[in-house]
Amino acid sequence: TSFGFKEVREEDKSQLVGNVFTSVASTYDLMNDLMSAGLHRLWKDRLVSKLHPFPGMKHLDVAGGTGDVAFRILEDINSTRHRALQDATEDYLHEETQIYICDINPNMLNVGKKRAIERGFGDNKALRWVEGDAEALKFEDNSMDGYTIAFGIRNVTHIEKALAEAHRVLRRGGRFLCLELSHVDTPIFKELYDYYSFSVIPAMGELVAGDRESYQYLVESIRRFPAQEKFASMIADTGFQKVEYENLVGGVVAIHSGLKL
Ligand code: SAM
């Protein structure tokens, strides 16, 4: 069965994407681990290490429903690496760390909130859960030190709008980072990857999540997403400087970054 996604009118897309994530939220973690053989954890670690989080930072993680990226940022800030800095600056640190987790789907936010409690972050004041659309952020201009979006931008209806919003809310010097499934072009690896994504992933979705269509949509949306160079030029066209990307696992995923200067 085909999702027939290309035939779907644009105004219906957000609704449809919402439904997809409502239906996968419960088995979301398990599927992520299975599909990426646990690698998504390392990819998210890499994303956060490129962010260089710091105590007192104001950060926005968009499409961050499950909290995976936000928890890593918080853990990094709380780690011993920053302990000395924190102790030394405690009295001078006027700004408290604020990590906003923004997601369009309240079910994903609820999964994230539940996980925050499980991880002992239940009453952590830094984590702030906000329901909202990447294309129309409810944050002020120049208000964020950092912006991350992990496996999220592929799902927004107008990528350019989401990029423009990222640029708007970042302060000068603020860093944009995007982790996304991307394009593989090494010949043999590409064939293996195509087989894996077109045959294995939908079957796995059916078996584990009882939902072949959502995972079929996932695979199709990866194909439609612009390749690394194209996406980098879209980021640069938004006004970001020093735009770069890093391929992981031969381009299965890529981390794009840019600075608002
Ligand atoms: N960042 C998390 C991670 O890496 O585990 C979640 C990624 S999940 C694949 C994609 C998320 O994007 C979902 O939680 C979905 O609700 C959210 N999403 C889709 N469209 C969005 C939009 N326009 N604005 C904000 N979030 C959106």
Image (cartoon, rainbow, N blue to C red):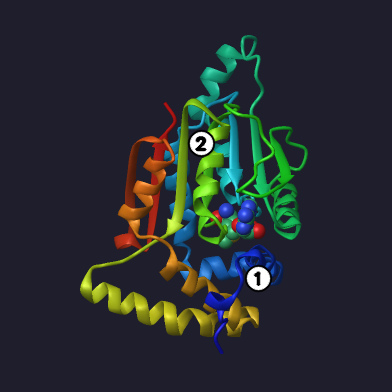
* Mark 1–mark 2 distance (CA, rounded to whole Å): 28 Å
Query: Which of these two is toward me, 8 or 77?
Result: 8
Query: Which of these two is toward me, 127 or 243?
Result: 243
Q: Residue at x 61, y 64 (%)?
A: 29
Give the image location of residue 45, x and y in percent: 46, 47
Question: Considering only vertical position in the picture, is 159 above or below 51?
Answer: below
Residue at the outermost left position: 187
Compared across the picture, whether 88 is left or right of 173 comes to right
Tally the marks: 2
Snapshot quadrant of residue 253: bottom left
Snapshot quadrant of residue 143: top right
Q: Quadrant of ligand 1?
A: bottom right
Compared across the picture, whether 133 is left or right of 88 comes to right
Which comes sooner in the sequence, label 1 or label 2? Answer: 1
Give the image location of residue 261, x and y in percent: 42, 26
Label 1 crowd bin: few (<14), some (14–19), many (20+), radius 10 Å: some
Q: What amino acid is labelled 2 in the image? A: His
Rendered image: mark on residue 167? 2
Which one is in front in this view, the residue at disc 1 or the one at disc 2? 2
Disc 1 marks which residue?
20
Question: Considering only vertical position in the picture, is 215 above or below 50?
Answer: below
Residue behind label 1 places its C-beta within 8 angstroms of ligand 1: no
Compared across the picture, whether 52 is left or right of 21 comes to left
Question: Considering only vertical position in the picture, is 232 above or below 250?
Answer: above
Report if the CB atoms under discs 1 and 2 are less than 8 Å apart.
no
Q: Secondary structure at mark 2?
A: helix
Give the image location of residue 106, x and y in percent: 75, 56
